[in-house]
Amino acid sequence: MANNRGTVLPLTAAQAEIWFDERFATGPLAYNMADYIELRGPLDVELLVQAMHRLADEAEGVRAQFLEEDGVPGQIIRPLAQLPLKILDFSEKAEPLAAAERWMRADHAEPLKVTDFPLYRGALIKLEPEHHLLYLCMHHILIDGYSRVLLYPRLAELYTRLAAGIADSAADPGAIPAFHLLLDAEREYRDSPLVERDRTYWTQRLTSGAHGPAPELVSLSGEEPAPGRGALRHTSRLSPEATDALRALAQDGKVTMPVLMVAAMAAYTQRVTGIAGPLLTLPVTGRVGAISRQIPGMLANYLPLAVRVSPEMTRAQLLRRAWVEVASALKHQRYRGDRIRRDIGLRTDDQRAFGPFINVLNQDPELAFSDDCRGLVVNLSTGIVKDLIMTVLNTADGTMEIHLDGNPELYGSAELATHLARFEAFLAALAAMPADQPLGRVGLGATGELLGLLGEWDPAAEGQADEGLVERIRAVATRTPDAVAVSDGAESVTYRELVTRVAGVSVRLAQAGVSAGSVVAMFADPGVPFVVGVLGVLGAGGAYLPLDPAAPTARNGALLRDSGAGHLLVGAGYEASAGELARPVTTAPVTVVGLADTPACRELPACVGGGSDLAYVMFTSGSTGRPKGAMVQRSGMLNHLWAKVADLDLAAGETVVQNAPLTFDVSV
């Protein structure tokens, strides 16, 4: 179709998805993409503007105006009467760079509407006489992430040609091919038998057949899905050592860096969610053929990638599986993700991502505008974020940078920061682990992050069971003394307060005659004092026996006699009951020690007992006969706790709820 403004071209499938998504949205969507090029050196502003005009002439797709005729969307390539570029001078401001960054982020937050023209804007910001920022913000319907690799180097090349006095020439070997060739290539694919081949691949890959169940969509957020109207970003730059370790791992595993990152993200997602075959969302260029790879435009596709991961797998097995999945997906990358969703039975109004995005932009960020003027590409936003996007980029110094963008409706800033720190630590552990070690041995904590009381679960930890629980808690108190350790609604204690109160109980028990192997009965309600008492018993070398204050006196008395406990540690309010309980015991005298009147002790006594000593004695219910006391060694208790830390991925910021009766072994 055509009108008085020119030929109306069809949209690519990717453009159509964005068009309808925005047109039917109930509010503005965050489809703005933004970068800036940091320019250092002498810059001819007039030549740069000319180069940008020439780039817009060549890259016809950035001059598209979108419209709808008879319900059918289309695009017209229009000339630019004026370049949408502001010239700003921030050199007089107190902190020019900070001011420029604030301005760019505020501009990026203003949405471009799909019906606007032009659908991009920019600014050249002067910071110093030889320090400028070239800011560019574009609607995602114009270009995808791959197009950045084409546009920015071409801009630098055009500036260089102008500076050298080279006239514009149709014979320029670097000129961008006509935009319609990109559309032609997609139309040829849609009319080819390859579509059915690709449909069959994806359907069989993701279901048990044409009518099999749809796979489970994956998110690291527990919130309900929400439109991507903004984004939160956290960034981490890997050290040279960490970068080298990852490159060595990729070389050793005979995979590319994108495949390595896919493997790591799949393993991380599996550990966080517990799903054996977690789906990721893999952005691909959607381009096949040399011509398509030279033309900027929005052609990107977003594919589901299922990398089956299990804790028993080795690193080599993980990398191999990721390589096979990525290689297979790329062979079928032009089949649209929205059609895959429909084919596997997902509802058309379900706009969730398949899973976390993992996007590796393997490009050189440095640009040469002239011998004296160099440019450095800095990404501000990759566009809309429906859930979570992990973007990995090269930096100018040869290291790598990781951006984690999250939908603010689904993730808080602290949550994103934690995920990024843990993922970075996970990468380091993956690179350092022995090739034959199971993935399940890799912890999920960030460097320096406390994973609960026990720290990170790793092979070495299994040999540390003799160190003791109380010693571990003291180590935690040294690192994070002001972190809350225990809370029961009535009071909260920090780790510093906990260890001093525990020390006081241990000293008091030792003075009362408790030593290695002694059994100390606990007669208290759940709460901070009970935790203090248990740890105090262990610190003194004893084993604790929990009694239920609500149980009949006869039962508690029988357990006290059978256990041979020589001491009774009593919580506030139960002193009288404890005296009545202890008096009938004639096998040995029972010493009653009050928890409430035991003072804290800042001088921490040496802990008594080793891994082969008792940790606790716990009696069965007696439903099948007389209650029997089960005796558990300290090393066995700690091994069990290690397994729980690993199985549940317990981490800092998470709370373990004491909801089991104290006389039931689950309470441990």
Image (tube, helix red, strand yellow):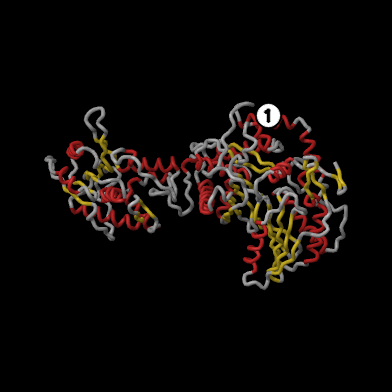
In the image, 187: left or right of 301?
right
- Whether residue 511 is visible, yes or no, is yes
Count of all numbered marks drawn on residues in the image: 1
Quadrant containing the N terminus in the rendered view: top right
In the image, 596: left or right of 134?
left
Q: Residues within 10 Å of mark 1 (few under 14, many from 20)?
A: some
Q: Give whichever of 273, 16 is nearer the camera.
A: 16
- In the image, is residue 124 above or below residue 269? below
Q: Give whichever of 538, 188 is nearer the camera.
A: 188
Q: Give whichever of 146, 163 is nearer the camera.
A: 146
Q: Position of residue 645 (x, y in %)?
A: 41, 43
In the image, 396: left or right of 606?
right
- Whether residue 424 is visible, yes or no, is no
Say what amino acid the circle numbered 1 marks: Thr
Q: Position of residue 305 (x, y in %)?
A: 61, 38
Q: Give whichever of 53, 475 is nearer the camera.
A: 53
Name the secondary structure under disc 1.
Answer: helix
Quadrant containing the C terminus in the rendered view: top left
Q: Quadrant of residue 548?
A: top left
The residue beneath circle 1 is: 200
**Residue ID at (24%, 33%):** 628
**Residue ID at (60%, 54%):** 401
**Residue ID at (22%, 44%):** 521
